[in-house]
Image: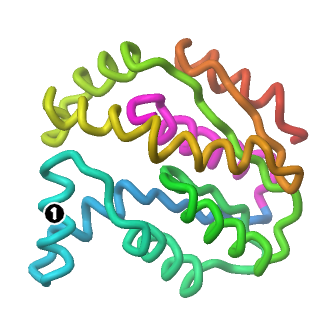
């Protein structure tokens, strides 16, 4: 859910991996940041995407997949750790990401789900001060979470190809970080 701290935890995970496995690089993919950069462009697709973003809507699946797939295809190296933040947001995106894991022979990847409620999310989003975090945009994002995002989460939760870790996200940053490390095999 938006506001669960996934960006913060993904960065902490990247820092930790660099410490425990310094010989391998970390490929960090943050789809939200990619969308925010993308909609700054002047092209037709960027303008349409910006309108959806400004209204707090959910981006079309093809564009969401494009945000991460071209970056992985063009930049991902064989021996890197891969951290994906903010994707998938819909069921079909989960299938596309699953095919990428298969293509790159990533067996039993970890899917970390930071579970929070709407009230916690609203409080966190309101407090972070981004321009897109006004009351109406927050409400819109949280409303499509149940219909769009939960099926994607369940794709991984119910899939034996993945290590699914559910973490209580309604804790301090440090406690969430510790809970993640306690469940990882590093």
Q: Residue 17 lies in magenta, yes or no? A: yes
When asked about the image quadrant of residue 36, the answer is bottom left
Residue sitting at 72 percent across and 62 percent down? 81
| Direction front: furthest residue | 147
- When the figure is inspected, residue 11 is found, relative to residue 135, above or below; the finding is below
Q: Which of the 4 quarters of the picture holds residue 108?
A: bottom right
Horizontal relation, residue 8 to residue 72: left or right: left
Q: Quadrant of residue 52?
A: bottom left
Determine the main secondary structure of the stretch shown in magenta. Answer: helix
Where is residue 176? Give x, y as percent. 62, 22
Name the foreground residue: 58 vs 27.
58
Near mark 1 (Cα within 10 A), the count class, few <14, some 14-19 or many ≥20, is many
Quadrant that contains the C terminus: top right
Give the secondary structure at mark 1. Answer: helix
- Residue at horizontal 62%, vertical 43%? 153
**58 displayed left or right of 129:** right
Start-end of magenta stretch: 1-22
Is residue 39 left or right of 3 when viewed as pictured? left
Q: Is residue 47 above or below residue 44?
A: above
Q: Nearer the viewer, residue 167 or 45?
A: 45
85, above or below 124, in the image: below
Residue at the disc numbered 1: 50
Q: Which is more toward the observer, 169 or 147?
A: 147
Q: Residue at x 69, y 74 (%)?
A: 100
Residue 154 position in % (x across, y down): 67, 43
Residue lying at the far bottom of the rendered structure: 74
């Amino acid at each position: 859910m938006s506001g669960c701290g996934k960006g913060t935890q993904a960065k902490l995970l990247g820092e930790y991996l660099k410490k425990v496995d310094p010989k391998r690089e970390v490929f960090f993919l943050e789809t939200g940041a990619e969308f925010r950069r993308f909609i700054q462009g002047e092209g037709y697709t960027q303008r349409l995407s910006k309108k959806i973003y400004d209204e707090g809507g959910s981006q079309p699946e093809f564009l969401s997949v494009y945000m991460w797939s071209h970056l992985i295809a063009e930049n991902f190296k064989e021996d890197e750790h891969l951290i994906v933040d903010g994707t998938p947001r819909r069921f079909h995106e989960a299938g596309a990401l699953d095919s990428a894991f298969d293509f790159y022979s990533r067996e039993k990847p970890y899917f970390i789900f930071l579970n929070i409620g709407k009230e916690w999310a609203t409080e966190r989003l309101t407090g972070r001060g981004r321009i897109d975090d006004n009351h109406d945009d927050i409400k819109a994002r949280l409303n499509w979470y149940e219909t769009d995002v939960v099926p994607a989460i369940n794709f991984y939760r119910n899939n034996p190809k993945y290590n699914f870790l559910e973490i209580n996200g309604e804790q301090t940053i440090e406690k969430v970080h510790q809970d993640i490390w306690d469940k990882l095999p590093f």
